[in-house]
Image: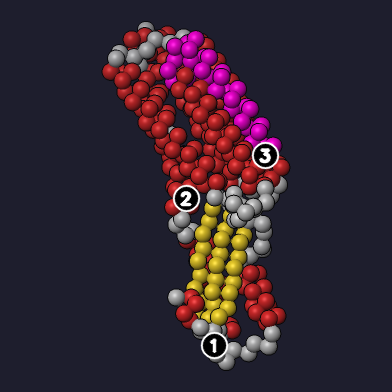
């Protein structure tokens, strides 16, 4: 994966999202539409998160140092956890705002302006979402993948706004203007509910990584490879530990060799390491693999 390409795409995404945020806030203030204003503030928060992601991408590209000897991989799930938490909080705020809007008798808004806004940004945001997804097929960046969720959410918000405001315009044209005032707060409630799934989609894996929960798929893969190696070479026993931080995978394996294991030189152990490493897949800069051998079971207890 090209970290330079990742950073370039994150910069582009940040600038465009900031432009969307300003447009939403200005349009929301002029039209009086709280749902548009909410969309603008969501985009502003998304911009701040993108800045954090960009900083994280730059740090990950750096080599480890004396203070961070395993690099900066651990920052990736932390940033995603912040993003997911902000999405959840803003969804709760929008839901409550919509409920109180309905209780207070709805809101009168300038439909012409907000319909144009929603139509334009529906096209722009969906187009950019698919563009980024296409670019990330080559980059294979988890930061880009989760960052792009904000574009999908924003595009969904714009679609919801467009459909709802067109419905409000139809109500007004048919002489049901007293019902049209409830469209804006009702949109807020629906948008808030629609944001819950993307928020949890980001929060769940990020929280697992921050808490240090072993990823099941990686743990199963290591055990599968080691069970086969144990049967093939007659190891007495082994223990394995796995951890994942963003795209970084940390794998630690300790093998107990039998007392009569044919060991001529260190090259024999290196050959076993190479075999196990190959079984686990192609090595890359994000994989930290440690394999040790011992004849005393106390060292794996």
Within 10 Å of disc 1 (Cα), the crowding (few <14, some 14-19, many 20+) is some
How far from the left and from the top, in percent, is residue 178?
33, 10
CA–CA distance in space, label 1 to label 2: 37 Å
How crowded pointer 3 is (Cα within 10 Å; few <14, some 14-19, many 20+) is rated as many
Count of numbered circles on the image: 3
- The image's colour scheme reads secondary structure
Label 2: state its secondary structure: helix
Q: Relative to 127, does residue 58 appear above or below in the rendering? A: below
Mark nearer the N terminus (3 vs 2):
3
Which residue is at 44% across, 48% downward? 207
Q: Is residue 263 above or below residue 29?
A: below
Q: Quadrant of residue 47?
A: top right
Q: Is residue 183 left or right of residue 17?
A: left
Residue 106 location (% of width, % of height): 34, 14
Residue drawn at point x = 54 percent, y = 34 percent: 49
- The tag earlier along the polypeptide, 3 or 1, is 3
Of residues 293 and 286, the one drawn nearer to the viewer in this rendering: 293
**Residue designated by label 2:** 210
Q: Dot 1 corresponds to which residue? A: 258
> Is 154 in front, or is 226?
226
Q: Is residue 222 magenta?
A: no
Discs 1, 2 touching: Cβ within 8 Å: no
In three-dimensional space, the C-alpha distance between marks 3 and 1, rounded to whole angstroms, equals 49 Å
Write the start and end of the magenta stretch as one range. 7-36
The residue to which callout 3 is attached is: 7
Circle 3 SS class: helix
Q: Nearer the viewer, mark 3 or mark 2?
A: 2
Judged by its main secondary structure, the magenta piece is helix
Mark 3–mark 2 Cα distance, whole angstroms, equals: 23 Å
Q: Which of the 4 image quarters holds residue 136?
A: top right
Residue under the image location 51 percent in, 22 percent down: 40
Q: Can you tell which mark lies on residue 169?
A: none
């Amino acid at each position: 994966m090209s970290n330079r390409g990742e950073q370039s795409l994150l910069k582009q995404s940040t600038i465009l999202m900031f432009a969307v945020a300003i447009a939403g806030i200005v349009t929301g203030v002029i039209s009086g539409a709280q749902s548009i204003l909410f969309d603008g503030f969501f985009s502003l928060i998304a911009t701040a998160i993108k800045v954090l992601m960009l900083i994280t991408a730059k740090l990950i590209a750096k080599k480890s140092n004396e203070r961070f000897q395993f690099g900066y991989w651990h920052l990736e799930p932390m940033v995603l956890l912040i993003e997911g938490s902000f999405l959840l909080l803003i969804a709760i705020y929008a839901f409550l705002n919509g409920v109180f809007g309905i209780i207070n008798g709805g809101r009168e808004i300038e439909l012409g302006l907000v319909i144009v806004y929603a139509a334009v940004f529906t096209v722009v945001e969906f187009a950019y979402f698919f563009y980024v997804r296409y670019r990330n097929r080559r980059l294979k960046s988890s930061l880009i993948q989760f960052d792009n969720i904000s574009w999908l959410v924003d595009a969904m918000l714009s679609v919801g706004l467009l459909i709802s405001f067109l419905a409000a315009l139809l109500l007004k044209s048919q002489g049901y203007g007293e019902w049209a005032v409830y469209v804006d707060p009702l949109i807020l409630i629906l948008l808030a509910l629609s944001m819950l799934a993307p928020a949890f989609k980001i929060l769940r894996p990020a929280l697992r990584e921050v808490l240090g929960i072993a990823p099941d798929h990686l743990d199963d893969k290591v055990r599968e490879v080691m069970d086969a190696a144990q049967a093939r070479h007659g190891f007495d026993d082994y223990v394995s530990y796995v951890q994942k931080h963003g795209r970084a995978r940390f794998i630690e394996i300790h093998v107990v060799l039998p007392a009569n294991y044919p060991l001529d030189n260190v090259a024999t152990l290196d050959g076993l390491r190479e075999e196990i490493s190959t079984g686990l897949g192609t090595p890359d800069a994000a994989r930290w693999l440690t394999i040790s051998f011992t004849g005393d079971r106390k060292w794996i207890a």
